[in-house]
Image (cartoon, helix red, strand yellow):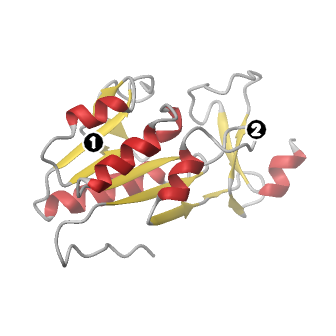
Amino acid sequence: MFIEPSLAGGRRGWIEVICGSMFSGKTEELIRRLKRARIANLKVEIFKPAVDTRYDENNIISHDENMIVSTPIENSQQILLLAQEVDVVGIDEAQFFDEELPNVCDQLALRGIRVIVAGLDMDFSARPFGPIPALLAKAEYSTKLHAICVKCGHIANFSYRKAASTETLLLGEKDSYEPRCRHCYYERK
């Protein structure tokens, strides 16, 4: 269970990472935390990669259709320019950002900003994905979420690609991917 850190002793920033496979609820958890920050009257800015247009060009929308307004950006450096005088920065689909994202998050945290990042920790080949491993190493808090394996019903940690493409970046939903446990992922049937 995640416990929100206190701001006692002055304004201090930190990094939180929410990771897991597809359909594990990462975006849902990100939206939940950001809405709670707004309830606490904190100024929140939310970013997503411009390449992710699956549900909406601007907003972050979970598979359960919860939504929060966001700003699509081309690269992580834009966050530093756009996140002025904020308390909390949310970043969705972090695996699609450039390798500078961990440094950007460091700079934000040093400014006293709470940074909440959500993304896939592994790609469809079960390899560490984009800047997520470096973010996990730098984060004060990490949450690993799991989906349910569609083959056997155990916890799923892998994103199995049903489509034949070998491209690392293939935007898709249930038509292209399904969550699988370790056994069912490597069985590949």
Helix, strand or loop status at disc 1: strand
Q: Residues within 10 Å of mark 2 (few under 14, many from 20)?
A: some
Task: Residue 38 in the image: state x and y as whole percent.
Answer: 16, 57
Q: Residue 182 is drawn in which quadrant? A: bottom right
Helix, strand or loop status at disc 2: loop
Task: Residue 68 in the image: state x and y as whole percent.
Answer: 26, 43
Amino acid type indicated by mark 2 = Ser
Can residue 62 be seen from the camera position used here?
no
Q: CA distance from mark 2 to mark 1?
A: 29 Å
Q: Is 108 positioned to the left or the right of 128 in the image?
A: left
Q: Residue at x 44, y 22 (%)?
A: 51
Q: Residue at x 58, y 38 (%)?
A: 130
Q: Residue 48 is drawn in which quadrant? A: top left
The answer to whether residue 69 is above or below residue 167 is: below
The answer to whether residue 187 is above or below residue 59 is: below
Task: Residue 81 in the image: state x and y as whole percent.
Answer: 23, 32
Q: Is 171 positioned to the left or the right of 79 in the image?
A: right
Amino acid type indicated by mark 1 = Ile
Residue behind mark 1: 46
Q: Residues within 10 Å of mark 1 (few under 14, many from 20)?
A: many
The answer to whether residue 18 is above or below residue 84 is: below
Looking at the rendered structure, the number of numbered marks drawn on it comes to 2
Q: Residue at x 33, y 26 (%)?
A: 73
Q: Nearer the viewer, residue 35 or 93?
A: 93
Residue behind mark 2: 125
Label number found at residue 9: none
**Quadrant holding the C terminus:** top right
Q: Residue at x 18, y 78 (%)?
A: 9
